[in-house]
Image (tube, rainbow, N blue to C red):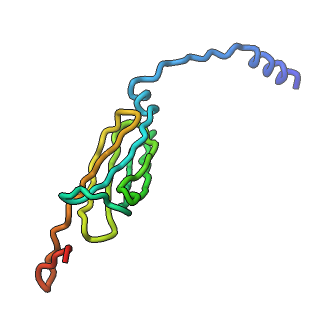
């Protein structure tokens, strides 16, 4: 018993050596963050798209992380606090008027706004013939 106590006293008396290391530029980039806002417009008129679903996907610490939201009546979504780097942005709508959007974006600043202009769907061809989405 006294040997264990003596060993514990000896171990705790040894000063701990702590090495600090400057983070690499890659580590600095992953620790920095961006306040991301999404602006969703549609068509040639670039009118705001209300209720569009905004899906964000990025890598952080070797894991894939996601976040989802929707646009307000002015077509804005966010702000979303994300680490700087590559983020995949996907925009969908519940109606059949707009095409789905999806693309990668590189976040490099403290605050960024990504503006997406959705394109109108042309229509579909069914067994009954051509059907315009806008009719």
User: Residue 96: x, y in percent?
Assistant: 26, 71
In depth, the one of 122 and 47 nearer the eye is 47
User: Residue 24: x, y in percent?
Assistant: 42, 23
Examine the image and state in which quarter residue 28 appears. top left
User: Residue 63: x, y in percent?
Assistant: 44, 45
User: Residue 22: x, y in percent?
Assistant: 48, 19
Examine the image and state in which quarter residue 11 appears. top right
Total of numbered circles in the picture? Answer: 0
Compared with residue 24, is residue 84 higher up or lower down, i.e. above or below? below
Residue pictured at 43% horizontal, 56% vertical: 69
In depth, the one of 24 and 35 nearer the eye is 35
Q: Quadrant of the N terminus?
A: top right
- Farthest residue in the left direction? 129
- Relative placement, left or right, of 40 versus 77 is left
Compared with residue 114, is residue 27 higher up or lower down, i.e. above or below? above
Residue pictured at 20% horizontal, 74% vertical: 133
- Farthest residue in the right direction? 2
Q: Quadrant of the C terminus?
A: bottom left
Residue pictured at 43% horizontal, 51% vertical: 66
In depth, the one of 28 and 97 nearer the eye is 97
In depth, the one of 75 and 2 nearer the eye is 75
Compared with residue 10, is residue 73 higher up or lower down, i.e. above or below? below
Residue pictured at 44% horizontal, 46% vertical: 80
- Relative placement, left or right, of 40 versus 10 is left
Examine the image and state in which quarter residue 72 appears. bottom left
């Amino acid at each position: 018993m006294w040997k264990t106590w003596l060993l514990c006293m000896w171990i705790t008396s040894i000063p701990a050596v702590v090495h600090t290391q400057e983070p690499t530029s890659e580590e600095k980039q992953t620790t920095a963050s961006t306040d991301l806002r999404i602006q969703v417009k549609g068509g040639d008129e670039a009118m705001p798209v209300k209720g569009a679903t905004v899906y964000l996907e990025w890598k952080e610490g070797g894991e894939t992380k996601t976040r989802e939201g929707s646009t307000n009546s002015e077509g804005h979504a966010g702000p979303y606090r994300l680490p700087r780097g590559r983020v995949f942005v996907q925009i969908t709508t519940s109606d059949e008027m707009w095409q789905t959007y999806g693309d990668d974006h590189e976040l490099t600043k403290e605050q960024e706004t990504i503006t997406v202009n959705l394109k109108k769907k042309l229509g579909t061809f069914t067994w009954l013939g051509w059907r315009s989405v806008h009719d």
